[in-house]
Image (spheres, grey):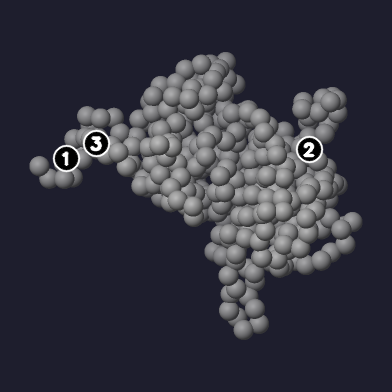
Amino acid sequence: MDVIKSLRSQVQANAPITTIDMHTTGEPTRIIISGFPKLTGPLLVQRRDLMKHYDHLRKRVILEPRGHWDMYGALLVQDTELVTYGDADIGVLFMTNDGYSTMCGHATIALGRFLVDTHDLAVFPNREKLKYDAENQSVEIKLHAPCGVVTITCPTTRDGQASDPSRPVSFLSVPSFATALNHIIELPEELTWPGRKRDLVRVDFAYGGAFYALVKASDLGFSPGLNLRKRKDDEEEEMDIEALRTAANAIIKAADLNSDLRFLYGVIIIVDDGPVNPQEERFWESGLSICFFADSQIDRSPTGSGVQARVAAAYAKGTIRLGESRNFESIVSVHFHEGRFLGTPVEEVNNHFAANPTAAEAVRVRVEGWAKYTGTHAFVLEENDIISKEGFAIRKNGLSGLPRL
């Protein structure tokens, strides 16, 4: 039998893992539409069940040889407690190289388009219940993520049956807020990198569906612009990614935040244009940044939940007001001159994490961006294929992602 026919027969017989792949400013989202076991119960219970019993499937889809260290996944969950009560249209569990995140903005933007474009009721049972807004030519989707309900607005064609890729998808997530501003942390002595100039560094901590540390690049010893700008001879200087990664890991280690949901998910190193008056806080307004999250994954996009966190920190400092929009760039969007995100604080809300939850200490942030399709997959597992059963990754210090022997 021809190998193509043979693989197709395996697909039909062995229930492959099928995906739709997209990217948001170059950051991948592998949307899993079938092939995972049916999970039941509240969304966070399903998340724990996935971690405990089916984590090998996450590794199989995310890691090599089917994926790579910086792959990102989104498992659609048709039934959750909020879907049952009509507060959400569908659920999602986000996947990284390291596990399961609470929120993901770039994947949410991609899901906005896909959930409008699919009409397969096995994938999205509530698709035909979505209401078309004729005036704005858009459809609203309520996505149940582990952090809460995220409201997506996806622009559509005139009949609302397909997404309009020429206009940005936007979302409103859970309340965002700063947890610590101008916090001084001591960096571990054993973690050094070229240009490191001090042991103490000033950091903001903020929440945008996940917790982030926000730090100024020059405070870590990096040159203005992270060498992204051209020199006088018009030659581009190289960015030291490994030095940036080491610096981000140093901040994570120093912060030492650990819990089930309230953990430091990522570090956003914000590019600044050189020394400024620290009292002006102008460097927090620089749109360009690079985000390290999960196990040192690098976000190609401007980081949607990170934009929420950055806007919340700026709002807490008084450098942005309700209704003001700000552009956010990544190294990919700067290079290609497209794919920037737009972040806007739209309303004050109560911060239920605060000691006084009646105080308006948080904001809801609207984030806008673009996502594109890159393909579809039907991943199979051939008999006796030990290497690709759980996936692996080659790192500097050897193999990662495999169970220890």
The residue under the point 68% across, 53% down is: 190
Judging by the rendered image, the residue that carries numbered circle 1 is 6
The CA distance from mark 1 to mark 2 is 55 Å
Residue 273 on image: x %, y % = 75, 66
Dot 3: few (<14), some (14–19), or many (≥20) neighbours within 10 Å? Answer: few
Sequence-wise, which precedes: disc 1 or disc 2? Answer: 1
Sequence-wise, which precedes: disc 1 or disc 3? Answer: 1
Discs 1/3, front: 3
Work out whether 178 lies above or below 337: above
Q: Secondary structure at mark 3?
A: loop
Q: Quadrant of the N terminus?
A: top left
Residue 238 on image: x %, y % = 58, 70
- Whether residues under marks 1 and 2 lie with C-beta atoms below 8 angstroms apart, the answer is no
The quadrant where residue 336 appears: bottom right
Query: In front: 385, or 119?
Result: 385
Judging by the rendered image, the residue that carries numbered circle 2 is 179
Sequence-wise, which precedes: disc 3 or disc 2? Answer: 2
Amino acid under disc 1: Ser
The quadrant where residue 306 appears: top right
Dot 1: few (<14), some (14–19), or many (≥20) neighbours within 10 Å? Answer: few
Looking at the image, residue 359 sits to the left or right of residue 364; the answer is right
Amino acid under disc 3: Asn
Q: Which mark is residue 264?
A: none
The residue under the point 36% across, 45% down is: 66
Residue 147 on image: x %, y % = 63, 30
Judging by the rendered image, the residue that carries numbered circle 3 is 384
Work out whether 158 lies above or below 333: above
Looking at the image, residue 348 sits to the left or right of residue 94; the answer is right
